[in-house]
C-alpha cells in the first residue's frame, strides 16, 4: 500500500510542474495593463490577437491593378481570420460576451470578465490579449490672434509655400483621387468641403461607402453631441473638419485645400477627442475595403488612395510595447492594399525622441512634422529618432503646421460653420495627404506603388537641416534628419519628378539558384530609361556595382533576370539603381539572400539585468578564428561593433528599447549570420 501511494504522489508531483507551466503560459499572454483593470472593475474591453497572421506584402507588391491589389489583400486577410477565429468566437458566444471580429489584422474586440480572458488566453491559437485603452486627441497651444489677421483674399500660406498652386497651373488639382480621413468626424455640409464629399453629387446625397462611424458608445463618459452609430457625417470636435479643408477645401473665393479637385470620404474614430485601438482598427479596416452603411457589400472600387491620420496614442494613454505590434500590423496591411498612410508626427517637441507614439513610430506610417512660414520647425513638432518600437529616423518629411487656415464646425449646426487658423502636426499631415493626391492625379499609376510615391515625396522635398544640439546620429548635413525628415515638402518638384519618371516598377525579388543568386524584376512602363545598375552589399550600407543591364524602353514594360554566379558568403543584399538618359537615378527596394558561409550561425540570448547579450557562435563547417559582432538600427545605422574570438557576452549598455539587427561577420567583412532581436 505504501508503494502504491508513493507511486501516486510521484505521479502527482511530476504533473504539477506541467500544470503550473500551462497556467503561467496562458497568463503571460494577457496584457498587464488589462489585468490591472480588474482591481477596480468586473469587466473590461480587450483585443484578442491571433497567432496566425497572413504574409501578404510580397505578393501584393506584384499586383499591378489597383482593384485586384485591394481585393487580394481583403481575400487573404479575411480568409485567415475566418479559418482561425472559430474557437474564440464560440467561447465568446458561450459567455454571451459582445464581440467584433476584424480581418485587417487577425483579431477580435470583446468585453468580459477575467475568467473569460483567462479561458481565451489558454487557447493555443491566441497569441496575446491586450488592453483597449482610451486615447485622447492632443493639440499644441493655439494662437487665436492669427484668425483676426488672416487675409482671406489669398490662398493660405501653406499652399503657396509648398507650391501647390503651381501644380494647379499644370492642370493637376487632385482629380481622379480619393482622400480619406479618420478623425473626430466631419461637417460634410460645410460649404468649404461639401462639393468635394464623394457622397454628394450636387443635388442628392448617398452616404454609402463614403462615411463610416466607429463610435458606438460614449467612450469617456457623458453624452455625445452628434450621437452614436451615425448614418451620416458629423463632427463633435471640429478637428476633422479642419483637416478635411486643408486637403480639399474651397471656401468662397478661397482655395484652402491642397488638392481642390480630389474627393474625400471619412470615418469617425474618436468620440469628442477620445479613441481606442478598436475604433482606429475599425476605421482602417473600412478604408481598406469600404462597405455600405449596413456594413455589407464590400467594394474595393470605393477605397481611398491616401488616408490622413491626425491623431496619436502616447504611453500615458495606454499605448506601450505590449500593443505596438498590433497597430503596426494594421498599418502594414492597409499600405499593402495600395493606400498611403499619412500620419502626424505628434506635438510633444522639442526634445529628441519625442516621436514616441503610434502611429508615427512605425516604418510604414508616413510621419509629418510641422514647419512655420519661415521654414523653421515648430517648437511643438515632435523630433526623432523614434525608439519606442524600432529605432527609426522620424519624421519622414515636414509641412506647414503653424497658423493653418481652414474650415471649422460642429454638431451639424450650420450657424456655427466658420474658419480658424490652428497649429499642430495635425495641420501639417493634411498638406502631405493633399500633395499625394496631386501626384497621383499627374501619375495615376502611382496609386498602386506606395513605396515609390513615398520616395518621390521625400527625395523632392526642400532640404532642411538640423542644428545643434542634434538628435540621434544627426549632424549639420544629415538628410534625412530627426527634425525635418527629408525636408519641407514641395508639391511642384514632386509632381515634375513623377511626370519625368522613366520607369514604373512592379516587382523586384531574389531567390537562390543552387550556389548562385537569381534576381528578377518587372516593370509596367519604361520610357527614356538608360540602364539598371545591379548593386550588391554585405551589410546594406556599403554597395558595389556588379553588372549593368540596358533598359528595353517598352511602353508595355519588361521582365528581367540576372544571375549572380559569385555571391558573397553569408548575407547578400541586392538593389537596382535605375538611371535615365539625363543622369537622374532611382533606387529599387532592397532584397536579400543568405548563403551560409561554412555553416556558421549564431543564437542570441538577452541578459537585460546586466545590459548584455550572449552571442552563441555555432560553427558546423569551416572554422573561423575571429569575428566581429555588429548591432544596427533597422534603418541601417551601425550602433555597436565588438570583436569576438568565440561565444561570449557583449555589453549593450545604454541601448534604447526597440528592434535591432545583429550581424556576425569575419574581420574581412563577409557577413556570416544576421538576426533581428528586441532589446527591452
Image (cartoon, helix red, strand yellow):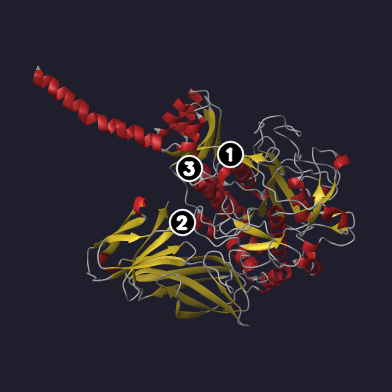
Residue 236 falls left or right of residue 111: right
Residue found farthest to the bottom = 582
First reached walking from the N terminus: tag 1 or tag 2 = 1
Where is residue 676 shown, x and y percent of the image?
A: 40, 58
Whether residue 62 is visible, yes or no, is: yes
First reached walking from the N terminus: tag 3 or tag 2 = 3
Camera-near label (3 vs 2) is 2
- Marks 1 and 2, how far apart in space? 29 Å
Q: Is residue 228 above or below residue 198?
A: above
Q: Check disc 1 and report its element: helix, strand or loop.
A: helix
First reached walking from the N terminus: tag 1 or tag 3 = 3
- Marks 1 and 3, how far apart in space? 19 Å
As drawn, the label of residue 322 is none
Residue found farthest to the front = 469
Where is residue 220 shown, x and y percent of the image?
A: 65, 33
Q: Check disc 3 and report its element: helix, strand or loop.
A: helix
Residue 623 falls left or right of residue 232: left
Q: Are marks 1 and 3 in contact (CB under 8 Å)?
A: no
From the image, tell me which residue sits under label 3.
80
Q: Is residue 78 above or below residue 146?
A: above
From the image, tell me which residue sits under label 1.
278
Q: Check disc 2 and report its element: helix, strand or loop.
A: loop
Viewer-proximal residue, 642 or 441? 642
In which quadrant will I find the N terminus?
top left
Camera-near label (1 vs 3) is 1
Q: Quadrant of residue 238?
A: top right
Residue found farthest to the top = 1
Badge 2 local density, few (<14 within 10 Å), some, or many (20+)?
some
Camera-near label (1 vs 2) is 2
As drawn, the label of residue 656 is 2
Q: Are marks 1 and 2 in contact (CB under 8 Å)?
A: no
Amino acid at each position: 500500500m505504501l508503494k502504491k501511494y508513493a507511486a501516486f504522489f510521484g505521479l502527482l508531483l511530476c504533473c504539477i510542474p506541467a500544470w503550473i507551466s500551462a497556467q503561467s503560459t496562458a497568463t503571460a499572454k494577457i496584457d498587464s495593463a488589462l489585468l490591472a483593470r480588474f482591481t477596480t472593475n468586473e469587466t473590461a474591453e480587450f483585443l484578442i490577437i491571433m497567432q496566425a497572421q497572413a504574409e501578404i506584402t510580397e505578393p501584393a507588391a506584384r499586383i499591378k491593378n489597383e482593384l485586384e491589389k485591394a481585393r487580394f489583400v481583403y481575400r487573404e486577410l479575411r480568409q485567415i481570420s475566418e479559418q482561425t477565429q472559430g474557437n474564440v468566437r464560440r467561447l465568446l458566444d458561450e459567455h454571451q460576451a459582445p464581440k467584433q471580429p476584424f480581418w485587417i489584422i487577425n483579431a477580435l474586440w470583446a468585453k468580459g470578465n477575467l475568467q473569460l480572458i483567462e479561458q481565451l488566453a489558454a487557447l493555443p491559437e491566441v497569441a496575446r490579449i491586450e488592453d483597449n485603452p482610451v486615447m485622447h486627441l492632443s493639440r499644441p497651444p493655439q494662437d487665436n490672434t492669427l484668425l483676426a489677421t488672416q487675409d482671406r483674399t489669398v490662398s493660405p500660406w501653406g499652399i503657396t509655400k509648398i507650391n501647390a498652386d503651381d501644380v494647379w497651373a499644370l492642370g493637376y488639382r487632385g482629380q481622379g483621387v480619393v482622400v480619406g480621413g479618420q478623425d473626430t468626424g466631419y461637417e460634410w455640409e460645410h460649404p468649404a468641403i461639401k462639393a468635394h464629399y464623394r457622397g454628394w453629387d450636387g443635388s442628392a446625397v448617398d452616404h454609402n461607402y463614403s462615411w463610416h462611424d466607429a463610435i458606438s458608445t460614449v467612450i469617456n463618459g457623458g453624452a455625445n453631441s452628434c450621437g452614436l452609430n451615425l448614418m451620416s457625417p458629423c463632427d463633435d470636435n471640429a478637428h476633422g473638419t479642419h483637416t478635411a479643408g486643408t486637403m480639399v477645401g474651397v471656401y468662397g473665393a478661397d482655395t484652402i485645400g491642397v488638392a481642390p479637385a480630389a474627393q474625400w470620404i471619412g470615418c469617425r474614430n474618436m468620440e469628442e477627442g477620445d479613441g481606442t485601438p478598436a475604433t482606429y482598427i475599425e476605421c482602417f479596416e473600412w478604408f481598406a475595403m469600404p462597405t455600405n452603411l449596413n456594413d455589407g457589400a464590400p467594394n474595393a472600387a470605393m477605397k481611398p488612395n491616401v488616408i490622413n491620420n491626425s491623431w496619436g496614442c502616447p504611453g500615458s494613454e495606454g499605448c506601450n510595447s505590449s500593443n505596438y505590434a498590433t497597430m503596426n500590423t494594421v498599418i502594414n496591411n492597409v499600405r499593402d492594399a495600395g493606400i498611403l498612410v499619412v500620419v502626424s508626427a505628434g506635438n510633444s517637441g522639442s526634445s529628441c525622441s519625442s516621436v514616441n507614439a503610434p502611429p508615427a513610430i512605425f516604418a510604414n506610417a508616413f510621419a509629418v512634422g510641422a514647419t512655420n512660414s519661415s521654414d523653421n520647425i515648430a517648437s511643438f513638432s515632435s523630433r526623432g529618432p523614434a525608439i519606442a518600437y524600432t529605432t527609426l529616423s522620424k519624421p519622414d518629411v515636414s509641412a506647414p503646421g503653424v497658423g493653418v487656415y481652414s474650415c471649422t464646425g460642429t454638431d451639424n449646426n450650420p450657424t456655427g460653420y466658420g474658419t480658424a487658423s490652428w497649429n499642430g502636426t495635425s495641420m501639417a499631415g493634411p498638406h502631405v495627404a493633399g500633395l499625394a493626391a496631386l501626384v497621383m492625379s499627374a501619375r495615376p499609376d502611382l496609386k498602386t506603388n506606395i513605396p515609390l510615391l513615398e520616395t518621390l515625396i521625400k527625395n523632392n522635398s526642400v532640404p532642411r537641416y538640423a542644428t545643434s544640439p542634434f538628435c540621434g546620429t544627426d549632424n549639420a548635413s544629415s538628410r534625412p534628419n530627426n527634425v525635418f525628415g527629408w525636408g519641407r515638402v514641395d508639391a511642384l518638384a514632386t509632381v515634375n519628378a513623377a511626370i519625368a519618371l522613366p520607369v514604373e516598377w512592379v516587382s523586384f525579388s531574389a531567390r537562390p539558384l543552387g550556389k548562385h543568386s537569381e534576381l528578377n524584376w518587372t516593370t509596367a512602363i519604361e520610357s527614356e530609361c538608360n540602364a539598371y545598375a545591379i548593386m550588391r552589399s554585405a551589410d546594406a550600407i556599403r554597395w558595389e556595382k556588379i553588372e549593368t543591364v540596358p533598359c528595353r524602353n517598352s511602353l508595355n514594360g519588361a521582365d528581367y533576370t540576372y544571375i549572380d554566379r559569385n555571391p558573397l558568403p553569408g548575407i547578400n543584399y541586392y538593389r537596382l539603381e535605375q538611371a535615365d538618359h539625363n543622369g537622374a537615378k532611382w533606387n529599387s527596394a532592397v532584397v536579400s539572400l543568405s548563403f551560409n558561409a561554412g555553416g556558421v550561425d549564431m543564437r542570441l540570448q538577452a541578459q537585460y539585468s546586466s545590459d548584455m547579450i550572449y552571442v552563441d557562435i555555432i560553427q558546423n563547417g569551416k572554422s573561423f578564428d575571429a569575428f566581429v559582432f555588429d548591432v544596427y538600427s533597422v534603418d541601417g545605422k551601425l550602433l555597436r561593433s565588438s570583436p569576438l574570438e568565440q561565444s561570449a557576452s557583449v555589453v549593450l549598455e545604454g541601448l534604447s528599447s526597440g528592434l535591432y539587427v545583429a550581424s556576425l561577420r569575419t574581420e574581412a567583412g563577409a557577413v556570416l549570420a544576421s538576426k533581428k532581436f528586441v532589446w527591452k
